[in-house]
Image: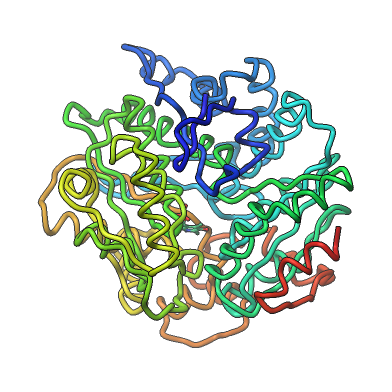
Amino acid sequence: MYKSTRDGSLAVPSAETIVRGISPEGGLFVPEEIPRFGPGELEALRELPYTGRAVAVLRKYLTDFTGDELSAAVEGAYTGTFEGGRPAPLRSIGTGRYILELWHGPTCAFKDLALQLLPRLMPVASRKTGGEADIVILVATSGDTGKAALEGFRDVEHTRIMVFYPENGVSEAQKLQMRTQRGGNVYVCGIRGNFDDAQTAVKNIFTDKDTAAALSRRGMRFSSANSINWGRLVPQIAYYVSAYCDLLDAGEDLSSGFNVAVPTGNFGNILAAYYAKRMGVPINRLICASNENRVLTDFLTTGVYDRRREFRATLSPSMDILISSNLERMLYELCDRDDGYVTARQTELRDTGRFAVEGTVRERFSGLFYAGSCDDSETLATIAETYRERGVLCDTHTAVAMNVSEKYLAETGDQRPLVTVSTANPYKFSPAVLRALTGGDVPDSFAAAEKLNALTGAPVPRALSELRSLPVRFSDVCRRDEIAATVTAHL
Ligand SMILES: *Cc1c(COP(=O)(O)O)cnc(C)c1O
């Protein structure tokens, strides 16, 4: 059963957490007990392909689904949809150093790992909860979730999807990917505001009783495809389990564990690594990498979360976030699951823009995490250096994690194997990556991609090159205070 971070008296089955997305009082759903792999159980997964590993993880959490339901969803999500046939290949980039490449899916970013699967779980979950209502998926995106959710949910029966992205806060390729989206049940709209504005507006719509009632009269209900939805997080745990199996296969000595470095915005991806650790994967340090919006770095080093600062538009736009939703789940775990404590901190954050943790909670955060940040010029330098020294072309988000990985190693001298999570294909951010390598300024995304291809030989994914010839279907833009009205008008 699942509880809410803000109401421990709730107990809902996993199917319901997926359909609802967020708890009615605004909290996030969390498993009542974090399952563990028994002795030998994890190692046995080495024999299985990625799909088998993913099913093993899902079975531990989604206990009200049958094994057949989970297998069917996983096979559908990961068979034939990822370039090269492997959703999460672990690539060696030097002694004891690896990158976990999570961008071989249909939209070229790691969000595909969860958003190919969630749309296959949602209809099953809806049936289980006795829902007759059509589901309306509302998404606020910093760039990659929107496209991945659109691709996953397009033309799924009894489902509609509406995506809101910051007009001036995503890359050209990301914007075009969304504006050209195919499918009969999709809607896309830019907003004049940043990701936090979009996310806050969408969260408010979810918990607004009048809107819910109006929807219900029309036979519809809202759900979420953002990482506030438990169904988004649980597929992400699987790739940390898989990486562990692959490290063993590579012959690494994991007797004192390994470290993972994750480029972070909404804290979803790194939270999945934490759950994997709790399940028995021997992860030592969780390295939390931020860009110039370093609200998490500051929180993890000082204990004070303070969003009252200038929002920066950076070269890693998918991490341009000051309200990091999933930190709430982490806080819940580290304060001994005290719903009153979490509610008080979240209320403080909403009302004053800051909160602080002290004592044991703060110590636990520092014990688990290393935090670092990387500005745009360091990001560019890291892309150039990683290409020159390791022959690896990384995107701007991956570069943030690479940079903070190096800072961690320089500071600690830690010899354990280190897995740096690679979250997007470099061609999603071609102008920035090209600038890193040549210093040249080619603002047009397609021209930059061609130059980058000529320079490095790295293939341009077809999903990105074909954008040039696809018709733009959605060019609406609204103000942030018009999001609710836009949603109602389009239903
Ligand atoms: C979403 C995203 C991130 C941040 O992931 P969170 O789960 O929000 O922390 C990092 N890199 C890329 C490319 C992304 O799309």
Residue sitting at the far bottom? 441
How many numbered marks, from 0 up?
0
For the question of whether residue 394 can be seen, the reply is no
Q: In this orientation, which residue lies closer to the viewer: 68 or 190?
A: 190
Q: Looking at this view, is 458 or 137 the one in front? A: 137
* Rendered position, 183 above or below 472: above
Q: How is the image coloured?
A: rainbow
Pick the residue in front: 479 or 269: 479
Residue 79 in the image: x percent, y percent? 67, 33
Q: Position of residue 303 (x, y in %)?
A: 22, 58
Residue 215 seen anywhere in this rendered image of the structure: yes
Corner quadrant of residue 37: top left
* Quadrant that contains the C terminus: bottom right
- Give x and y (percent) for residue 166: 61, 73
Q: From the viewer's perspective, is residue 137 above or below residue 1?
A: below
Residue appearing at x 62%, y 43% in the figure: 21
- Horizontal side of residue 409 vs 21, given as left or right: left
In the displayed structure, 260 sits above or below 1; it is: below
Residue in the picture at 58% in, 72% down: 170
Q: Position of residue 392 (x, y in %)?
A: 39, 58
Residue 28 is left or right of residue 69, and the answer is: left
Name above or below for residue 92 compared with residue 250: below
Comparing 392 with 274, the one in front is 274
Q: Would residue 186 appear left or right of 115 to someone viewing this image?
A: right
The residue that appears at 15% across and 48% down in the rendered structure is 359
